[in-house]
Image (cartoon, grey):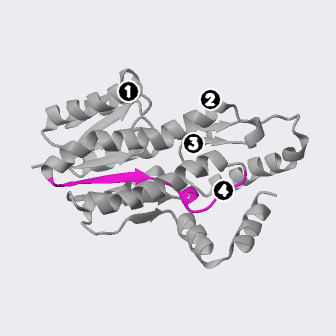
Amino acid sequence: MSKTILITGSSTGIGRASVMKFHQEGWNVIATMRTPEKEEELGNLDNVLVTRLDVLDLHSIENAVSTGIDRFGQIDVVLNNAGYGAYGPLEAMPRENIVRQFNTNVIGLIDVTKAILPHFRSNKNGTIINISSIGGKMTFPFGALYHGTKFAVEGITEALSYEMGNIGVKMKIVEPGAIATDFGGRSFDFQNDESLEEYQPMVQGLMGGFQNVLANASPPSLVADVIYEAATDGAETIRYRAGADAEQLLDARASMDDVAFLDMIKKQFA
């Protein structure tokens, strides 16, 4: 019997690449997105169900889970992939953007997780894979909100591994480095106020630094391969890195003290 995965944020980037990877491996896929009516390709694939799920809409989450179970009989893996990044000086960030950042990347992830738990607990089996980032273990300038959410994802996932182990559920974290997705476009929310003159030199450095980082970005398919490994290896491993830059930066973060590491990052964005 084919296994089934539910993926949030399936319209682009890592989510879409993951749909294609699991489909190619013979899985049933529940490909969820905010606007499924705009999707013209994935719905034509065998054993792929395209349905609406907005992590800010609890009803849509519950409906996507129940629709997927009705279609395929069981869900074996949930991939919490939907998210976006809010960057910029904290003084320039409207409160509604702050709330949206945490509602999307943290509360939405928790709501999706809670929605699947009764099903997993009944089956005494399941895997939840949360997309974190190297930004869940280290930070870049002006990323207080984004990094705050990814640090939260790391802590939530690790802490849940204790209680989930009691009901047969594995918790996994995937930590990508720079990935060639549209994160710098519609998924990137940068706020600035040029009247805050003290921050502007670092703002300019950030823009240049991000261009350098993205110049060597890995393809989303690389992350999809790591996600598939996390879903199928049967290991108790919690964290999986994705990308050569992730390996390099996370090793550096672990081996350097705070002052040395932050100084290295500052120089990259000067």
Q: Left or right: where does residue 69 sit relative to residue 150?
A: left
Q: Is residue 48 above or below residue 269?
A: above
Q: Which secondary structure, mark 1?
A: loop
- Of circles 1 and 3, which is in front? 3
Q: Left or right: where does residue 138 sit relative to residue 23?
A: right
The residue depicted at 27 percent of the width and 37 percent of the height is 30
In percent of width and height, residue 211 lies at 70, 50
Badge 3, how many Cα within 10 Å: few under 14, some, many 20+? some
Q: Which tag, 4 or 3, sits closer to the chain's start?
A: 3
Q: Which tag, 4 or 2, sits closer to the chain's start?
A: 2
Q: Which secondary structure, mark 2?
A: helix
Question: What's the distance in space between the residues labelled 1 and 3, CA to CA?
Answer: 19 Å
Residue designated by label 3: 183
Q: Which secondary structure, mark 4?
A: helix
Residue designated by label 4: 213
User: Magenta segment, which residues?
Assistant: 124-141
Question: What's the distance in space between the residues labelled 2 and 3, CA to CA?
Answer: 20 Å
Badge 1, how many Cα within 10 Å: few under 14, some, many 20+? some
Q: Which quadrant is home to the C terminus?
A: bottom right
Amino acid type of the residue tagged 2 in the rendering: Glu
Disc ID at residue 39: 1
The residue depicted at 74 percent of the width and 68 percent of the height is 264
Q: Is residue 70 above or below residue 157?
A: above
Residue designated by label 2: 96
Q: Is residue 137 magenta?
A: yes
In percent of width and height, residue 68 lies at 21, 34
In percent of width and height, residue 62 lies at 29, 31
Question: What's the distance in space between the residues labelled 4 and 1, CA to CA?
Answer: 30 Å
Q: Is residue 263 above or below residue 77?
A: below
